[in-house]
Amino acid sequence: MVYAEYILKFYKSLSIDVELPEGVEVMNPYQDTVAFDLSRQFYEKFYNDSNPRTLIFGINPGRFGGGITGVPFTDPVKLEKLGIVNNLKKKVELSADFIYAMIDAYGGAEKFYHDFYITALSPLGFVKDDKNLNYYDIKFLQQTVEPFMLKCIRQQLDFGVNRQRCYCLGEGENFKYLSSINKKHNFFETVIPLAHPRFIMQYKRKSIDVYIQDYMRKFRS
């Protein structure tokens, strides 16, 4: 099978059926026919081959990017610029703005997605009180969804990915957690941290070019 088939089969099967902290809900765009069709178009366009990719792990999808398009760090505006027409509300997402500026610096979407596959420690998102929630924000949530996250990593390794290294979006809690489970389960030889796009866009916007160059340097290392 080509990568697109592996990825879409994986996303279609995703579900979290465990006790969650009070008020926490799972966000699963792949159960939405519109989002799944958009993600299908994206992956069939950029992953219709068997070239080994290097994984980049985010935290979990947010409500205005992958949570509605089914494509990590890709809002409806970016999706349309990739040639995938959609009727979603054209609201931009900060992290997506950085990711696609970085992708342009890399050489464009076709080249970037030929080399990399962006996923997340939890490919499904979480919301509480109508706000995005990171899996590590509540200790019980992290503990209860850990088996799901480990299963997801193992399933994606079966795509035939590069196991020499992976990259982690977030140099704090996400990197700490991914490093700890990687040490225990030996998924990858090396986990390389990258500053999280949300952090850059919220607190270091004047230094976007510096962070893009840091990404490029670490991709080449």
Image (cartoon, rainbow, N blue to C red):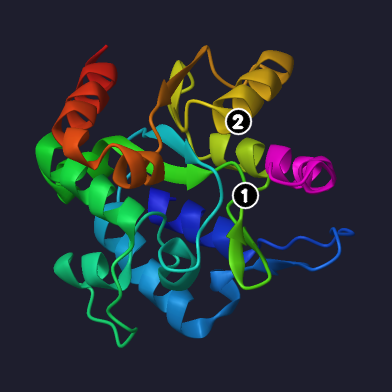
The magenta stretch is 136-151
Q: Position of residue 106 (x, y in %)?
A: 14, 35
- The amino acid at mark 2 is Glu
Q: Residue furthest bottom?
A: 87
Quarter of the rendering containing residue 38: bottom left
142 to the left or right of 11: right
Identified at 33% across, 66% down, the residue is 75
Reply above or below: 20 against 210. Answer: below
Label 1 crowding class (10 Å Cα cut-off): few <14, some 14-19, many 20+?
many
Where is residue 83? Give x, y as percent: 16, 71
Is residue 74 shown left or right of residue 30? left
Q: Is residue 83 visible?
A: no
Q: Earlier in the sequence, mark 1 or mark 2?
A: 1
Circles 1 and 2, Cβ within 8 Å, touching? The answer is yes
Give the residue number, with chain letter if any, for mark 2: 173
Q: Is residue 146 magenta?
A: yes
Look at the numbered disc 2 and give the secondary structure of its residue.
helix
Task: Name the residue located 71 percent from the left edge and 20 percent from the top edge.
Answer: 185
Q: Residue at x 22, y 80 (%)?
A: 85
Q: CA distance from mark 1 to mark 2?
A: 10 Å
Picture quarter with the C terminus: top left
In the picture, measured across the screen, residue 194 lies left or right of residue 102, that is right
Place of residue 92 in the rendered image (x, y in percent of width and height, measured from the top left)? 28, 68
> Which one is in front, 187 or 133?
133
Q: Quadrant of residue 157?
A: top right
Label placed on residue 134? 1
Q: Quadrant of residue 211?
A: top left
Magenta includes 44?
Answer: no
Q: Secondary structure at mark 1?
A: loop
47, 26: nearer the viewer: 26
